[in-house]
Each structure stands twice: as C-alpha cells, then as structure tokens.
Amino acid sequence: MLYLNLISKKVKQDIKLKRIYAILKRFGYILIIITALFAIIILFAKIILQNTFNQVVEQTTLITKNNQSSNKQIKEINTRLDNIEKIQNDFIPWSFLLEDLSQDISSNINFFSIKIDKDKQQIDLKGVAVTRKGLLDFKKSIEESDKFSNIYFPINNLLKENNINFEITAKLVISNK
C-alpha cells in the first residue's frame, strides 16, 4: 500500500493542532463535569452536615435546659442538707443538762433565773434557797456532776441561814452527742 501525502506541512500541522485542541476540549469538558459532580456532592454533604449539626445543637440545648433545672434543684437540696448538717452539728441537748440540774435540786431550792451562754459555755443560776444546808447540798451535787466545772460559789451565798438569795456560775462541759 502506498500513501500519498498531498497536504502541505502547514495544513498537516493545523490538522494535528485541531486534533490536540479537540482532545483537550473533551478533557476540559470531562474535568468540568467531574468538578461539578464533586461540587454537588460536597454541597449535599454540607447540607446534611448542617442539618445534623442543627439537630445536635437543638438536642444539646434541650438537655442543657433540663440539666440546668435539675442542677438548680440539686444545689438547693445540697444547700438545705448543709444547713441541716450545721444545725445538727451545733445542736446541744440542753434538755439533758436541765434534767440533770432538776435531779440535783430539792424542794429547798427555787430558781428565778437560769442563764445558759453557749458561746462562753457557762451557766448562771440565781434563786432562793430555803436553808443553807439545802444550798450546800445543791452545791455539792453540781460539783459531783460531770456536766459542770469551775463552779463559782460566792461566799455571800453562805452569810444567811434561811431564805438565801444565791448566785452560782459554772462552766459547762458540753458534748454534742
């Protein structure tokens, strides 16, 4: 077979360039189509992610609002419990002290003032004793008690024999249990 080449070199080169341009043009179109497809896929992915993000934010907001209410209630309960614990720790069973005191008195002793100072841990007793012996018996019983210490018993309490106005001051031995 024999090939005849009747086309000039310039025309041959133009034909060759047209083929290259056509191939490049097709490649460009394919590249544009692929890029457009990727852009569409990325756009859909963005929309899906944005919707998911919005749902997560909405759920988180609801959970946070619910938790804020619960957290507030928990803080209130904890505050109340702390206050109750403080009250219980500061509680002193005065009734036991007064019961002990009442067991130590006879009918010869009448109080008109019992002052208990928790901060100083002190008790001041003022009253009237019918007899000096009754007052001395009362003094002896509170000295023997484990609830009182450093008992101050002025000598003025012993000057009269009957109907004695007395004052006694003592330190309290306080136990919270």
Image (cartoon, rainbow, N blue to C red):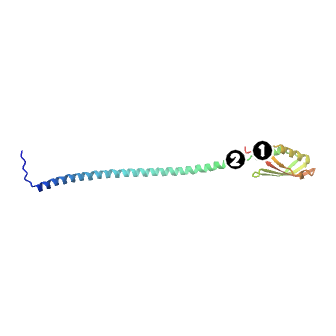
Q: Is residue 160 left or right of residue 53?
A: right
Residue 54 location (% of width, % of height): 43, 52
Q: Amino acid at mark 2?
A: Asn
Neighbour tally class for label 1: few under 14, some 14-19, many 20 plus, Cα within 10 Å: few
x, y (%) of residue 74? Answer: 58, 49
In this orientation, which residue lies closer to the viewer: 152 or 176? 152
Counting from the top left corner in percent of width and height, residue 132 is at 91, 48
Taking the view exactly as shown, the residue that stands out farthest to the right is 161
Q: Is residue 40 left or right of residue 70?
A: left
- For this orientation, the residue located farthest to the front is 9
Q: Amino acid at mark 1?
A: Phe
Q: Position of residue 158 (x, y in %)?
A: 91, 50
Q: Residue at x 61, y 48 (%)?
A: 78
Could you tell me if the residues under marks 2 and 1 are in contact, i.e. CB atoms within 8 Å? no
- Residue at 33% x, 50% y is 41
Residue appearing at x 11%, y 55% in the figure: 9
Q: Which residue is mark 2?
A: 89
Residue annotated with mark 1: 96
Q: Nearer the viewer, mark 2 or mark 1?
A: 2
Q: Nearer the viewer, residue 115 or 153?
A: 153
Q: Secondary structure at mark 1?
A: helix
Q: Residue at x 41, y 50 (%)?
A: 52
